[in-house]
């Protein structure tokens, strides 16, 4: 049996196990271990052990639970809700102002958490009921929350980019810096779309009545105090890191400790809050670590088979595709897989194949990491089985049906697809900041 057939058999077996409902790390790890034992006998057992040791020795992995803890502490303690109240007053006078403020809230939550799930939960429980009560169109605001929460996997500290860095062997610092401008660009595109559409269709996002927003300037400024703590934590954390005062791991520890101090200052720290935050952090962190372990083992077997070289030969030599055509084909594959899987599962399944191919074709892997992440955002919201669609369905009130949720994402998927093409056409949008930082470090 040729190595190409073995690789195809491994991949199809893994997909079959995933379709049976098995946990992602169990399906991938099982196929990898069975294949390694079948191919190399007892010596194949060393692959899983080596993958585990490689994972344990990767020092930046410590940042994963610390950033997750920071995000959950800030969200569970109600600090994110305080931020939305401030935006409600300051932005409510504009047509679509609360929706624009929601995008801003999502960017802030992304910068605090690094996960899209946290932004979705906060948006659906805090922002969505308020937007509906204020007469906003249910279809538009449902799309706003889904699109805004998807920024969590692109804006630093992105947990997905940490995982990508582990698999692609790229510095997390470069990946985070590369995600800043594309993330802000997409957020800006969302804001422009909301502002323009609500200007011509005011019924979609009516401005708040004057009596509701007519308060003394001093009272408005007092509301801004809600943003002092989270903004202070974020800028101190990233500022110390970019100035070279702290390392990546030290910055994550600073963020986690500061989030606890913020909860204490707000008078909201108690045993229940701490226990809830720790439990959620532990659950998410363990899930990610098991998935990374399975991915490394699967990738080691694939690399040993020479599957990556076979894929490159198939695309470039046998099919005669150009490097850019191969790149577009890989991104389409991510979108198709995103209809059924979340971003971590996609990264684990396809990364061992596509990242080496992208490198062999001469593409910058930091830039490719940003493309992958934006494509995941699109896949999250692509019907019929986009991950964010069903999260929203689970959290949305009864009056918002699945049909409404499907309709709500269409313009935002189009905006993100356009943003992806812009970053592909102009790689410096992603690469300028990391290049500038390292040149002046």
Image: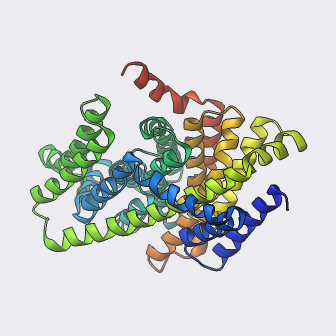
User: Residue 201 versus residue 257: which sits nearer the camera?
Assistant: 257
Viewer-side residue, 403 vs 263: 263
Q: How many marks?
A: 0
* Picture coordinates of residue 411, whole percent (x, y): 60, 54
Residue furthest to the top:
440
Residue occupying image coordinates x 43% and y 63%? 117
Measured as percent of width and height from the top left, residue 226 is found at 19, 51
Residue drawn 78% across and 48% down? 311
Image quadrant where residue 295 sits: bottom right
- Please indicate, yes or no, whether residue 238 appears anywhere in the rendered image: yes
Q: Is residue 409 visible in this depiction of the protein?
A: no
Compared with 148, 400 (above or below) is: below
Name the side, left or right, on which 320 lies relative to 368. right
21 over 259 or under it: above or below? below
Residue 317, position in %: x, y? 87, 39
Percent across and percent down for residue 364 are 61, 33
> Measuring 19% from the left and 50% from the top, which residue is drawn there?
258
Residue furthest front in the image? 42
Between 33 and 423, which is closer to the camera in this rendering? 33
| Chosen colour scheme | rainbow
Residue 9, located in which quarter of the rendered image?
bottom right
Residue drawn at 19 percent across, 48 percent down: 229
Q: In which quadrant of the rendered image does the N terminus lie?
A: bottom right
Q: Quadrant of the C terminus?
A: top left
Is 426 placed left or right of 193 in the picture? Answer: right
């Amino acid at each position: 049996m040729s190595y190409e057939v073995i690789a195809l058999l491994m991949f199809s077996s893994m997909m079959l196990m995933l379709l049976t409902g098995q946990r992602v790390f169990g399906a991938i790890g099982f196929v990898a271990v069975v294949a390694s034992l079948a191919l190399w006998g007892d010596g194949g057992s060393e692959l899983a052990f080596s993958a585990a040791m490689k994972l344990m020795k990767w020092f930046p992995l410590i940042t994963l639970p610390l950033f997750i803890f920071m995000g959950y502490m800030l969200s569970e303690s109600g600090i994110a809700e305080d931020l939305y109240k401030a935006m409600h007053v300051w932005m409510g006078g504009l047509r679509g102002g609360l929706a624009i403020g929601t995008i801003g809230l999502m960017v802030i939550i992304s910068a605090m958490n690094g996960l899209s799930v946290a932004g979705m939960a906060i948006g659906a429980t805090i922002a969505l009921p308020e937007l509906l009560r204020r007469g906003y169109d249910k279809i538009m605001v449902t799309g706003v929350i889904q699109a805004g929460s998807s920024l969590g996997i692109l804006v630093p500290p992105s947990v997905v980019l940490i995982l990508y860095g582990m698999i692609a062997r790229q510095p997390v610092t470069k990946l985070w810096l590369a995600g800043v401008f594309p993330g802000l660009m997409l957020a800006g595109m969302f804001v422009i779309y909301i502002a323009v559409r609500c200007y011509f269709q005011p019924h979609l996002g009516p401005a708040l009545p004057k009596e509701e927003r007519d308060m003394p300037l001093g009272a408005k400024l007092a509301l801004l105090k809600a943003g002092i703590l989270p903004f202070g934590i974020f800028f101190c954390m990233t500022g110390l890191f970019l100035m070279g005062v702290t390392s990546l791991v030290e910055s994550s520890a600073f963020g986690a400790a500061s989030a606890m101090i913020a909860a204490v200052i707000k008078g909201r720290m108690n045993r229940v809050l701490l226990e809830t935050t720790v439990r959620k952090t532990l659950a998410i962190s363990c899930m990610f670590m098991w998935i990374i372990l399975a991915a490394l083992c699967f990738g080691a077997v694939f690399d040993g088979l020479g599957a990556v070289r076979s894929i490159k030969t198939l695309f470039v030599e046998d099919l005669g595709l150009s490097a850019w055509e191969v790149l577009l084909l890989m991104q389409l594959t991510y979108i198709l897989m995103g209809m059924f899987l979340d971003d971590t599962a996609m990264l684990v399944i396809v990364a061992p194949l596509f990242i080496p191919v992208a490198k062999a074709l001469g593409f910058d892997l930091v830039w490719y990491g940003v493309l992958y992440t934006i494509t995941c955002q699109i896949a999250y919201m692509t019907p019929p089985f986009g991950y964010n669609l069903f999260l929203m369905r689970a959290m949305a009130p009864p009056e918002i049906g699945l049909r409404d949720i499907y309709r709500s994402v269409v313009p935002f998927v189009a905006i993100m697809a356009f943003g992806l093409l812009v970053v592909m056409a102009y790689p410096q949008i992603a690469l300028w900041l990391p290049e500038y930082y390292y040149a002046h470090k």
